[in-house]
Image (tube, rainbow, N blue to C red):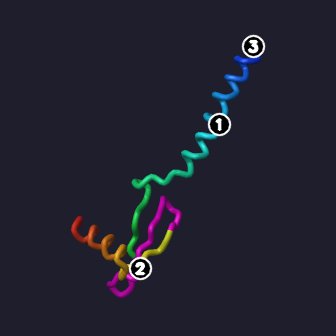
Amino acid sequence: MAENEASAAAEETIEPTETAPETQEEEVHPQDISYHAVENDGSVTAIWEMQGQKHLRTINPRSQEGKQILALFETAA
């Protein structure tokens, strides 16, 4: 009986380690996010939020969030 209990306990500890890598891959790390300004005739027409080479979303530069992002980059330069 002790062997069955030990193997059942071992199975329980294996399950969480098998599912852990899947949850780690889905996490978005803030340092992986970058922003790219799309310009046309010298003015910013869009801001692309990127994770590596993957396009996550497009931000309107006239929106509140777009203005905040552009302000951060203007003060950093």
From the viewer's perspective, is residue 16 above or below residue 60?
above
From the viewer's perspective, is residue 55 above or below residue 4?
below
Q: Quadrant of residue 71?
A: bottom left
- For the residue carrying disc 2, how many other residues have a C-alpha within 10 Å: few (<14), some (14-19), or many (20+)? some
- Residue at x-position 59% and y-position 40%: 20
Q: Quadrant of residue 63?
A: bottom left
**Which of marks 2 and 1 precedes in the sequence?**
1
- Decide which of 11, 52 is in the foreground and name it: 11
Q: Give the residue number, with chain letter if any, for mark 3.
A: 3
**Which of marks 2 and 3 precedes in the sequence?**
3
Q: Give the residue number, with chain letter if any, for mark 2.
A: 60
- Residue at x-position 63% and y-position 40%: 19
Q: CA distance from mark 1 to mark 2?
A: 41 Å
- Residue 35 has which mark? none
- Residue 18 has which mark? 1
Say left or right for 47 vs 10.
left
Q: Quadrant of residue 6?
A: top right
Q: CA distance from mark 3 to mark 2?
A: 63 Å
Provide the residue span drawn in magenta: 38-56
